[in-house]
Image: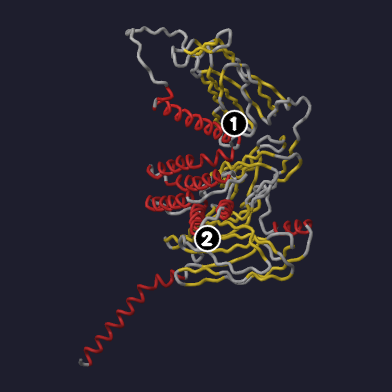
């Protein structure tokens, strides 16, 4: 090879290598687009308190990573949750998205002194990212000292205020501030801001001690409306709403919500591209005075209904043949703790067989405090005649008049006529008490000859009928025993119908998928998993968190692979709540397949029902 060709060859190799390096620059820089940091909500704690450790992972896309937490000497992890937020920055006409995923750990110290939280690492695309160690001091202290320290920690958050002078604040409002034990009221959490928010992260959600709660709204995305407060216009973001039912009398301050929000600060000059500012928010305090129900004039049959109610009743027909059924419907309508009191019972009616009613609750408002409780009884008259369904009394504490009220349904009459002739079933009792079957039958003998007949017990079909009758009697006994057990044991009933409810929930998810209602998919899919495990283990699905679900799976010895799939599915769903994400039908189909795998794994678990 001459020198000229060799030089040309080296030049070609140089340009080829240079071209490959240029092509690889975006991928090299992409590896640096992930960062990790950690921080605690306080560095000085008492031995009987807790602290929160947050591991913050930021990337330009949604990454599936889990921090590796080394052994924490002197600290114990007692709780874990995740949250995420998305911010978008526009520079020179190009948008840059940043997704921040927070892994929040609740830690409990078990010794005093200085404790070091070591570096926490994340593995991503073959590279390891680590945080800096954190030193905390644990001191001996009493509850009062810890409360004072928590008060100092609250100073890290924006002071709650309803003043229109505030730029961003979190406001909690209750529909009532004075209620009776069991009387429902609602509390709503809203952010008021003069800036357009770009991200939101929940640091502490309210727990509501001494109250039963129903979650009636939880924001899935950051959507705002305009609202005027004290003469000033704000962007408002509804975060959550709960309906609460107090269980104990006394004066209480509701748990406060802690959030971290981010918003864009506009540029001040040509060379200023603008920044994103983070702000910690603490909700305004809400005080509730809960009064005991009076004992004066309290009806003996009072079953805990509180509010304002009416009662109606009706039958589907007023004439039937004996042995046939009618349907008696009792409806309690109104507002109050509609599904939290014992239902009235139908008195026994002589010669009428009745069964446990089918019950249904229909809510007509989003707060689930107004609607109807519908009871449907099946009644079967055992003989012909006229029967009366007596009026049913229902007592409740009327919050309007602040007194007990007893109302009653109407009474109803129906007639049972003679049944169709069925000689195999007609039974007549003579005055002497001797029972004669089919006494009105007269046989017409066509052939006067007398034939020999075999006795019944020598015939094969006689024994077949006898055996089938015994089997039928055993089956009927077991069926009735099972039905009674389901009616008496709510947890057992939920356990038994869990698979039926699962098929119904999965059909709903499939309908959402087929109709391409993308925004509804993840709430319905997450509810399907929650409902199945809640029915199997007999606990409230609406009040449960991801940690509750994982704890139940741990208790029932689920595999690590299944627990990871459930945790990843909920985290992915949570990522969509506030930050949003680019979704399409292909991603939804992929997540639907993951949901099917999770359900298949859950159905293989031999769940132990909680008592």
Which residue is tagged 2?
A: 100
Is residue 380 found left or right of 394 in the rendered image?
left
Indicate whether 567 appears above or below 35: above
Give the residue drawn at x 66%, y 71%. Answer: 116
Q: Residues within 10 Å of mark 1 (few under 14, many from 20)?
A: many
Q: Is residue 24 above or below residue 285?
A: below
Q: Residue at x 66, y 36 (%)?
A: 184
Are circles 1 and 2 on residues that touch, CB within 8 Å? no
Residue placed at 68% from the left, 27% from the top?
396
Determine whether 373 is above or below 383 in the image: below
| Quadrant in which the C terminus is drawn | top right
- Left or right: 370, with 74 as reference point: left
Find residue 280 and report its horizontal and vertical position in percent.
Answer: 63, 57
Nearer the observer, 428 or 232: 428
In the rendered image, which quarter contains the N terminus?
A: bottom left
Q: Is residue 102 visible?
A: yes
Horizontal side, residue 222 vs residue 160: left or right: left
Q: Earlier in the sequence, mark 1 or mark 2?
A: 2
Foreground disc of the pair 1, 2: 1
Q: How is the image coloured?
A: secondary structure
Q: Quadrant of residue 287?
A: top right
Q: Position of residue 5 (x, y in %)?
A: 21, 88
The one of 317 and 294 positioned closer to us in this rendering: 317
Q: Which residue is mark 1?
A: 370
How many angstroms separate mark 1 from mark 2 (CA)? Answer: 40 Å
Secondary structure state at the residue bearing disc 1? strand
């Amino acid at each position: 090879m001459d020198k000229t060709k060799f030089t040309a060859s080296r030049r070609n190799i140089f340009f080829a290598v240079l071209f490959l390096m240029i092509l690889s620059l975006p991928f090299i820089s992409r590896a640096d687009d992930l960062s990790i940091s950690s921080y605690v909500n306080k560095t000085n704690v008492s031995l009987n308190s807790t602290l929160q450790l947050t591991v913050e992972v930021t990337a330009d896309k949604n990454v599936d990573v889990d921090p590796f937490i080394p052994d924490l000497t002197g600290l114990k992890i007692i709780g874990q949750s995740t949250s995420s937020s998305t911010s978008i920055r526009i520079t020179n006409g190009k948008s840059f998205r940043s997704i921040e995923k927070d892994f929040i750990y609740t830690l409990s110290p078990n010794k005093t002194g200085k404790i070091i939280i070591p570096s926490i690492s994340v593995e991503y695309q073959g590279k390891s990212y680590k945080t800096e160690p954190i030193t905390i001091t644990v001191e001996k202290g009493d509850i009062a000292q810890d409360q004072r320290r928590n008060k100092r920690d609250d100073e890290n958050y924006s002071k709650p205020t309803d003043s229109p002078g505030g730029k961003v604040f979190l406001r909690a409002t209750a529909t009532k501030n004075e209620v009776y034990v069991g009387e429902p009221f609602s509390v709503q959490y809203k952010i008021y801001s003069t800036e357009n928010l770009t991200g939101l992260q929940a640091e502490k959600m309210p727990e509501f001690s001494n109250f039963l709660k129903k979650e009636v709204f939880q924001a899935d995305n950051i959507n705002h409306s305009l609202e005027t407060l004290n003469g000033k216009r704000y962007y408002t973001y509804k975060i959550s709403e709960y309906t609460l039912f107090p269980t104990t009398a006394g004066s209480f301050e509701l748990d406060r919500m802690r959030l971290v929000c981010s918003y864009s600060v506009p540029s001040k000059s040509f060379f200023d591209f603008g920044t994103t500012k983070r702000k910690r928010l603490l909700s305004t305090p809400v005080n509730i005075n809960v009064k005991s129900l009076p004992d004066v004039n309290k009806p003996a049959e009072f079953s805990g209904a509180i509010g304002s109610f009416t009662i109606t009743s009706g039958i589907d027909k007023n004439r039937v043949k004996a042995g046939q059924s009618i349907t008696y419907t009792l409806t309690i309508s109104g507002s109050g703790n509609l599904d939290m009191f014992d239902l009235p019972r139908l008195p026994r009616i002589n010669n009428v067989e009745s069964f446990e009613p089918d019950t249904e609750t229909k809510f007509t408002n989003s707060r689930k405090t107004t609607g109807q409780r519908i009871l449907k009884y099946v009644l079967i008259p055992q003989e012909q005649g006229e029967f009366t369904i007596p009026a049913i009394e229902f007592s409740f504490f009327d919050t309007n008049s602040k007194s007990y009220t007893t109302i009653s349904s109407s009474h109803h009459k129906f007639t049972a006529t003679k049944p169709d002739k069925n000689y195999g079933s007609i039974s007549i009792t003579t005055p002497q008490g001797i029972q004669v079957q089919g006494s009105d039958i007269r046989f017409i003998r066509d052939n006067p000859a007398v034939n020999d007949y075999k006795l019944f017990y020598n015939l094969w079909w006689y024994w077949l009928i006898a055996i089938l009758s015994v089997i039928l009697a055993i089956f009927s006994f077991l069926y009735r025993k099972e039905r009674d057990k389901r009616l008496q044991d709510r947890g057992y009933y939920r356990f038994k119908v869990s698979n039926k409810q699962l098929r119904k929930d999965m059909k709903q998810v499939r309908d959402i998928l087929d109709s391409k209602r993308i925004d509804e998919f993840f709430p319905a899919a997450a509810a399907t998993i929650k409902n199945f495990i809640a029915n199997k283990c007999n606990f409230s699905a609406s009040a449960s968190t991801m940690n509750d679900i994982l704890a139940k799976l741990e208790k029932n010895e689920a595999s690590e692979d299944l627990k990871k799939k459930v945790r990843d599915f909920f985290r992915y769903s949570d990522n969509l709540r506030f930050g949003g994400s680019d979704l399409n039908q292909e991603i939804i189909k992929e997540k639907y397949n993951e949901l099917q795998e999770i359900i298949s794994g859950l159905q293989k678990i031999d769940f132990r029902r909680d008592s």
